[in-house]
Image (cartoon, grey):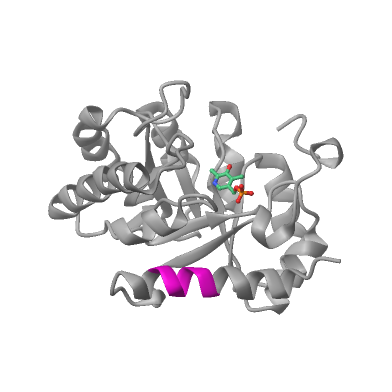
Amino acid sequence: MISIQQNLQEVRQRISAAAERCGRDPAEVTLLAVSKTKPASAVEEAVAAGQIAFGENYVQEGVDKIQALAAYPQLVWHFIGPLQSNKSRLVAENFAWCHTVDRLRIATRLNEQRPAGLAPLNVLIQINISDEQSKSGIMLDALPELARQIAQLPRLQLRGLMAIPAPESDYARQLAVCQQMADALAQLKQHYPSVDTLSLGMSDDMDAAIAAGSTMVRIGTAIFGARDYANATHNNN
Ligand SMILES: *Cc1c(COP(=O)(O)O)cnc(C)c1O
């Protein structure tokens, strides 16, 4: 029997320990609970244990959960999956954050589609930092130009960078990749005062990410248990 409450407590302790080891305040690191494929009832359990920030990968599944949990206005919903143009409106209308902006076309659509009654959509630019297999994210050399364009869109707030590094078991090599992201964030910050977020670190590289300066770690399985994609509702994304 897994207890989401217990899992959350363990993950929070792991974050605190990692932060303290490198002299950081644990409060600087937000835990994003990745609830993809999990039912609204599992999210509700996490909410009861004090969790506020949730990440979803599939647009329609995420929107369904956001609507099912509308009774909890304190929740902050992050879209963290690959985003197709034809799904951008649902993200603009329902989420508070989008971590996967990697081209101007998507940014422009999100900007146009963000409802006037909502605060600007918080966006992170996804960087392809080490994964040659992945088509998601931009190379670091393309960052200054995309950031400059996004900063001009009034319905978006550029908050920082996100990456999904290629799996790597060696801590020193994890740290080197995470450090590249932290350096890129530091440079971006110099130009854009709204930048304060580095979404970096999952179960296997969380310690290195926090040591490098991550401000948001994305954890799913360690909180909610293994995912069963057969039961997921994301097939039509
Ligand atoms: C699924 C996912 C996570 C969480 O992965 P777990 O292995 O379940 O902790 C984090 N970030 C992104 C972008 C994801 O898609």
Check the image and report above or below for 156 versus 167.
below
Whole-percent x and y of residue 235? 77, 30
Query: Which residue is at 86% across, 66% downward?
Result: 1
Please give left or right for residue 70 compared with residue 158 in the image: right
Q: Which residues are magenta?
A: 13-18
Q: Quadrant of residue 57?
A: top right
Q: Residue at x 46, y 56 (%)?
A: 206
Q: Give coordinates of residue 105: x percent, y percent.
A: 40, 27
Residue 28 visible in the displayed image: no
Q: Residue at x 76, y 46 (%)?
A: 227
Tell me which residue sits at (57%, 49%) in the image.
Answer: 93
Q: Which of the 4 image quadrants contains residue 132?
A: top left
How far across and how far down the image is residue 17, in percent?
A: 44, 73
Q: Looking at the rendering, in which quadrant would you find the C terminus?
A: top right
Describe residue 10's horizontal placement relative to residue 135 as left or right. right
Is residue 7 one of those drawn in magenta? Answer: no
The answer to whether residue 11 is seen in the rendering is yes
